[in-house]
């Protein structure tokens, strides 16, 4: 029987200073999923992360939602530790992260591939021994003008973006649930068509 547990990791940095920044959009999405399941995050005893566990659909697969308690660039260790603890294979790990190369308010889903310069993905791929996990890429757009990308991702969403942010987070949470319930291809067909 296949493992019915999925590990869903929201990337971001710890603390209030970063909680509303573009770089933390992955953590915002897993917060939406936790709220939907009526679950609270708690510190995990074997990994540098907080987790919330539940089944969005009674009798359906279990989701382990996770947020590293360290910085994004060191997400690999906690993700690997949680995958081992719960016995989750790489193909049932879903990483939700910000994506500079997609326009704001856009979602793309894929499995495998490189890290595209994203240090959180680089560290996770290294710790898992490869990049064969699912990515929910949440578009945050490119910085305007000559603004440095590192500065841009660590700034809060602009007021014009905040109007659509709640819908984007709900859509990304729907995409995670769709991957688990219907598979990646069906989820791609549904969410890529919206782009």
Image (cartoon, grey):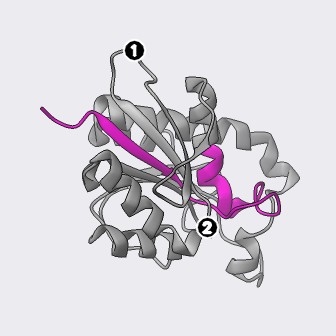
Locate the N terminus by quadrant.
top left
Write down the residue under mark 2: 70
Q: Is residue 101 visible?
A: yes
Q: Which residues are magenta?
A: 1-29
The residue located at (36%, 72%) in the rendering is: 127
Q: Is residue 48 left or right of residue 149?
A: left
Q: Residues within 10 Å of mark 1 (few under 14, many from 20)?
A: few
Give the image location of residue 193, x and y in percent. 43, 40
Question: Residue 5 lies in what quarter of the image?
Answer: top left
Residue 157 image point, x, y percent: 79, 57
In the figure, 67 relative to 12: above or below? Answer: above
**Does residue 189 appear in the picture of this structure?**
no
Residue drawn at x 58%, y 69% is 72
Neighbour tally class for label 2: few under 14, some 14-19, many 20 plus, Cα within 10 Å: some
The residue sitting at the top extreme is 58
Q: Which mark is residue 58?
A: 1
- 74 up-or-down from 103: above or below: below
Seen at 65% across and 63% down, the residue is: 141
């Amino acid at each position: 029987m296949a493992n019915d547990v999925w590990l869903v990791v929201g990337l971001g940095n710890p603390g209030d200073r970063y909680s509303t920044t573009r770089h933390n959009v992955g953590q915002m999405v897993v917060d939406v999923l936790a709220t939907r399941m009526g679950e609270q995050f708690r510190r995990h005893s074997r990994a540098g992360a907080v987790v919330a566990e539940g089944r969005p659909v009674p009798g359906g697969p279990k989701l382990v939602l996770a947020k590293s308690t360290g910085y994004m660039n060191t997400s690999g260790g906690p993700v690997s530790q949680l995958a081992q603890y719960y016995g989750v294979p790489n193909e049932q790990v879903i990483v939700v992260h910000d994506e500079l190369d997609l326009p704001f308010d856009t979602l793309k889903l894929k499995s495998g591939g490189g890290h595209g310069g994203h240090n959180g993905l680089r560290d996770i791929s290294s710790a898992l021994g490869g990049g064969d996990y699912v990515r929910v890429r949440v578009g945050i757009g490119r910085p305007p003008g000559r603004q440095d990308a590192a500065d841009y991702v660590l700034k809060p969403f602009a007021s014009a973006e905040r109007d659509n942010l709640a819908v984007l987070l709900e859509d990304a949470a729907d995409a995670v649930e769709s991957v688990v319930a219907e598979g990646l291809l069906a989820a791609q067909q549904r969410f890529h068509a919206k782009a």
